[in-house]
Amino acid sequence: MASALNVDGVKKIFGHNTVVDGVSFTVEPQEIMGLVGPNGAGKTTTIRMALDIIRPDAGSVALFGSAPNRQALQRVGYLPEERGLYQKSALSDVLRYLGRLKGLSAKAAQSRSDAMLQRVGLYEHRAKKVQALSRGMNQLAQFASALLHQPDLVILDEPFSGLDPLNVQVMKEIISEQQQRGAAIIFSSHNMEDVEEMCERVVLVSGGNVLLYGGLDELKRARGIQNIRVAAPQQPADVPGVTHTTVEDGQFEYLLVEGADPNAVLRSFLDSGIPVERFEVALPSLRDMFIEEVSRARSA
Amino acid sequence: MQRLLSEIRVVFSEEVRRSIRRKQYLIVTFTPVVILLVLALTVPLVRGFFSGDGSNADTSASGRVIAVVNLSPDFTFEQRDSAEIKVFAGRETGIAALQAGDADDLFIIPADYVQTGRIEWLHTDSGLSSVIAGDESEDRMRALVLQALTSAEFSADRMERLQDPLNLTRFEVTPNGDVVAEEEGQILTFFTVPFLSAWIMIMVIYMVSGTLLQSVSEEKENRVVELLITSVSPLALMAGKVLGLGATGLLQVGIWLVSLAALVPRIVSAFPNIGDLALSPGLAAAIVVFFLAGYFVFAVIMAGLSAATVSAREASSLSSIILLPALAPLILASFISLAPNGVFARILTFIPFTASPTMMIRLGVTDVALWEIALCLVVTFGSGLALLWLSARVFRAGILIYGQRMSLRRLWLAIRHAT
């Protein structure tokens, strides 16, 4: 079966500014791929090239095994970062129209629209004008519109921004349902915890370049043991082999330099006479990897 | 192709649905209808109250004085001599009375009137006032002649004249006493249906382009556009909008025209010659075709413009400049109608932005060669299609430009990126 999306060495230059420089990645059916990167990394430009909104200056994009033509694009559901709906139209009318643009018949667009509005809890508001809905409701409605036609590839650009935890949970459940249905999902976000929770694989982009790409577990293991969590009332004056320290909820989290010995950290606590309630050797978080990789790329 | 048509149909129906539900659209459409309806109900009552008689003009119900010189041996008018109708024996005495202000219009009935129906109509008015005031005199002359024809013995010639009693040739008597023939159609130029149609076309273009600019700008400002162009092609989106909003504009004009046709004759019964505005089917068809061609050219430019600009306000100010060429033939209508087959009129006929209104005006006042009509259509529709292609590229390129002022350089780069 062809990949849902194959981005191969795409490059985009606006004026003298290279926004995307040779980005490559693949998204397979039924997987959730995290697309992460700092602001201005080139994520949205890459997504726009994948959707044929803008054309790459170099490289190529294949949607479902072919160039992103109209037929392939009809199989994509897209929630853009800069979003909005027709403010003066009724919610139900807007969704029905967007469904029809995706090739649904009028009847199917209506029934799918009703079903999706029920699923996201907005069915009672279907006759209201969009401008009368809250920001969160708007976002849920647009999320629903991206899924109306049961797309094979769903691209979600910052889907949770501005949502309360309850609505985030609803969205996560629906994303999971879409994955089970067989859809491939690209999940672009600044929130590393969300990406870590939902994605099997990630692409980390910064300055238009891919810094990390692969399975999340593989990437973590490839870095070796770099994170130590210690629950203790205080920390020693000098902890050996540590590059970065975070203190959270009475717990110290240390990022070790490459090749450092975790036992040396434990020994430093015990030698200082500080009682250790818990000592945990952990794989690095995506957040850690993000900070490290982006910092390294920026300083290079 | 089928997919493209299907996409255009969806966008078209949505634009129509959304437009005709707008309060602004409903108010603009139906307010003139309501005003006409109120006038149609009240004007006859008010007229009846003041005049005591609501019937149409007859030979005596007017303050305007007409003079008649009858040279026809077939009937006499002497018995009709009155304060409102003055009968003179000779042409010179009639003209002298007209110049002296004793009469407002002078009708000279030649000896062969019954055979030809020809009557000379002399007056001292000029311009539009001669047309408006003349309607009244013409009606009275018609009634007078019909009475004269029916009071004598019937013959085949008379029967024919009864069906077509007036073949008027107008002359203006200048203050110097010169009698100047008016060129055929010159005076009525301003009232021809093609000319009015050209105005209506400009009006529709203005209205629709405003709605079009607003529609695209809203989609850009709401950020809906990014969703749209991943669902339909820019060409389908633009074509659907142009056609949909054009249809609502034409629907609006259609409602107004039907209301005018139904209600105005009742209101303006003092202008019975409104029936003269009837068109031949060929001319009507030509007007419709040029109307659509002109709309097509400007609507696709407006769609491209709306995508290339940041806000509705910016788009609106630029659109006024772009629409100026369409207004030029209307502003210069008197020059065009004086020499409808002249070089100037012909040049305007083959420039895409001025072609449709110019051709409409020309068709109203003269016969235009078939090749010119065909070439004009080819130029207009051809350039419309070329502009559609270019506008679709501008549309695709400019649609994602948010919050930046569009410069020619940026537009050029954006078009290149859209390839």
Image: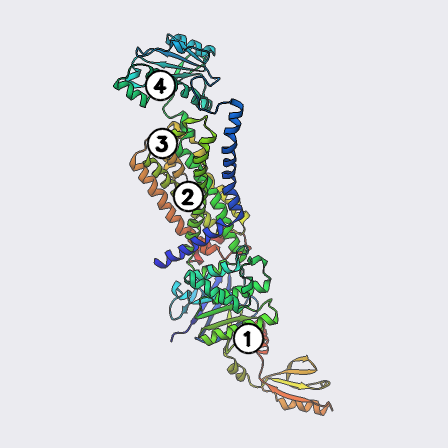
Q: Amino acid at mark 2?
A: Tyr
Q: Are marks 1 and 2 in contact (CB under 8 Å)?
A: no
Colour setup of the view: rainbow
Count neighbours of disc 2 (C-alpha within 10 A) and say few if under 14, some if 14 to 19, many if 20 or more. Answer: many
Which residue is nearer to you in this view: B43 or A286?
A: B43
Q: Are marks 3 and 2 in contact (CB under 8 Å)?
A: no
Along the polypeptide, which appears first: circle 4 or circle 2? 4
Along the polypeptide, which appears first: circle 3 or circle 4? 4
Q: Which mark is residue B202?
A: none
Using the numbered discs, state the Cα–Cα distance from disc 1 to disc 4 in whole angstroms.
94 Å
Q: Which residue is mark 4?
A: B146
Q: Quadrant of the N terminus of chain A?
A: bottom left
Vertical position of residue A240 compared to residue B360: above or below:
below
Q: Are marks 1 and 3 in contact (CB under 8 Å)?
A: no
The chain containing the residue under callout 4 comes to B
Q: Give a yes or no on whether discs 3 and 4 share a subunit.
A: yes
Vertical position of residue B307 compared to residue B293: above or below:
below
